[in-house]
Amino acid sequence: MTFHKHGYAGLGTIFQAEKFLFNDLDPAVAQKWVPGLTASPILTTKLSDDDYSALPCAYLVLEGDLTLPKEYQEGMAALQGQKTGDFTMYRSPAGHSPHLSWTEGVVDTTLDFVEKIET
């Protein structure tokens, strides 16, 4: 991240978005998405809403993600699962933006999870 005026307390812009957010897209397609990214704050507050324990949850591990390694993603889901109940885990070969590079897989995974929680 590149931070602006107020450092970590202010706004940040992802550095090399085409590498870290769009690494599994064709470079020309990645360049289409980069200009639409805007600076944003980093969430530094603790979440206080406990929806995870009230709802069935799933996590899609993105094995090609260069921003959050798969081991980190698995750890996040496991840690939350210890507090609120296991997550249904799914895997994708995609990078950080599977909605762009693995669209059919995202749809199929979502439908599979919906089927599981409806039965």
Image: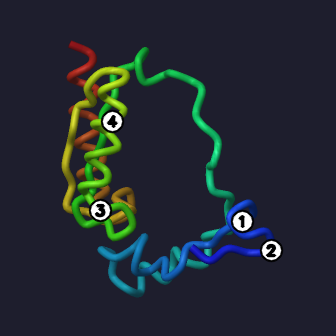
Q: Residue at x 22, y 24 (%)?
A: 115
Numbered label attached to residue 5: 2
Q: CA distance from mark 2 to mark 1?
A: 8 Å
Tag of residue 11:
1
Q: Give the side of residue 47 with respect to residue 56, left or right.
A: right
> Label 4 vs label 2: CA separation?
34 Å
Tell me if mark 4 has few (under 14), some (14-19) or many (20+) residues whose alpha carbon lies within 10 angstroms of its own: few
At label 4, the amino acid type is Leu
Residues marked 2 and 1 touching at CB (< 8 Å): yes
Q: Residue at x 38, y 56 (%)?
A: 99
Percent position of residue 49, x then y: 57, 24
Alpha-carbon distance for marks 3 and 1? Answer: 23 Å
Identify residue type, mark 1: Leu
Query: Mark 4, mark 3: which one is toward the viewer?
Result: 4
Amino acid type of the residue that numbered disc 2 sits on in the rendered structure: Lys
Q: How many marks?
A: 4
Give residue 55's quadrant in the image: top left
Measured as percent of width and height from the top left, residue 25 is found at: 33, 76
Between 6 and 86, which is closer to the camera in this rendering?
Answer: 6
Mark 4 secondary-structure assignment: helix
| Residue type pointed to by label 3 | Pro
Give the residue at mark 4.
79
